Amino acid sequence: MVKTYAVIGDPIDHSLSPNIHNAAFHSLNLDCTYIAYKIPKNELVSGIDALKAIKITGFNVTIPHKIEMMKLLDEMDTTCRVIGAVNTVSNENGKLKGYNTDMVGFLDPIKRKNLTIKDSDVLLLGAGGAARAIIVGMIKEKARKITIANRTLANANELAGFAKKIGGNVNVISLQQANELVSEYKFIINSTSIGMKNESSPISTDSIGKNSIVYDIIYKPINTDLIKKSKENGATIIYGYEMLLSQAACAFEIWHKMEAPYTVMKRVLLGGV
């Protein structure tokens, strides 16, 4: 019997997850298939009922359902609870268990490059859902200080409040201030969507240099303006596709209880971005 997996969201056409997971299934001869399933914003309950009816084995959750989906889970892991969002679900005999692989997916590429977060100063651009997972990861890895820069300061302050509750040393600045202070940070992380449409970098890259580690979580295009300019300045680069790949590998391991074929998944992912 073929096991079915899916990614749910809206829009969903651009998702690379089916390619990544189907390549992994194929390489390991697993009798599984992975589909993209569009569920519009207000139709989550009926969409999940439909997935349960076809006995879906597991699914990934993307925008706009990552918070709303939590209400439909039977249980969730600690990371999911702390971050307040779910992106991976397993269905065991009709019981839905939620996980969040954003934090692990974010940290894994840093660890693969043997870069140290402990005692580092971090500049985080953006204060949305991905930023929450990044902050949880950075606090867990004992970053010394995290500075949030965002267009809407109210959102940044809300995120800072959340971070302080879980033990983070966090402050908030404007994007304008970030331009002036960027050289003081070891990690510069873009968690905004600025760069997806080939716009110019959300901050000035003039002070980014060879001691900077620049991590842009946008995976399409691979070389955003922030990455291109930072690379020219000699910074260490972490690409958005690396986070996407680690998240996919993590979801694979939750569902299949075996190591994900990372190299196979990477090859197919880079063909798609």
Image (spheres, helix red, strand yellow):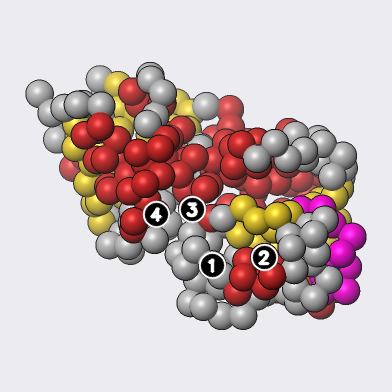
The residue singled out by tag 2 in the image is 231
Disc 4 target residue: 270
Q: Give the amino acid at mark 4.
A: Leu
Would you say 247 lies left or right of 269 here?
A: right
Question: Element under label 4?
Answer: helix
* Distance from the alpha carbon under mark 3 to that under mark 1: 10 Å
Task: Look at mark 1 in the image and give the residue it sits on.
Answer: 223
**Helix, strand or loop: magenta stretch:** helix
Residue located at (40% from left, 37% from top): 263
Image coords of residue 105 (percent x, y): 54, 40
Q: Quadrant of residue 203?
A: bottom right
Instruction: Give the amino acid at mark 3.
Output: Tyr
Left/right placement of residue 23 relative to residue 250 reads left
Kindly indicate the quadrant of the structure image that contains residue 30. Answer: top left
Comparing 192 with 226, the one in front is 226
Closer to the chain start, of discs 3 and 4, is 3
Q: Is residue 30 left or right of residue 259?
A: left
What amino acid type should be assigned to the residue bearing mark 2? Answer: Lys
Q: Label 1 amino acid? A: Asn
Marks 2 and 1 in Cβ contact (< 8 Å): yes
Judge whether 156 appears above or below 141 on screen. below
Q: What x and y, as percent, mark residue 189?
A: 69, 57
Region of the chain picked out in magenta, as a range: 178-187
- First reached walking from the N terminus: tag 3 or tag 2: 2
Q: Confirm or deny contact between disc 3 and disc 2 (CB under 8 A).
A: no
Instruction: Find disc 3 in the rendering and name its residue.
Output: 241
Determine the residue positioned at 35% across, 26% down.
255
Dot 3 or dot 1, earlier in sequence: 1
Q: Give x and y (percent) for residue 42.
A: 33, 59
- The Cα atoms of the two marked residues, 1 and 4, are separated by 12 Å
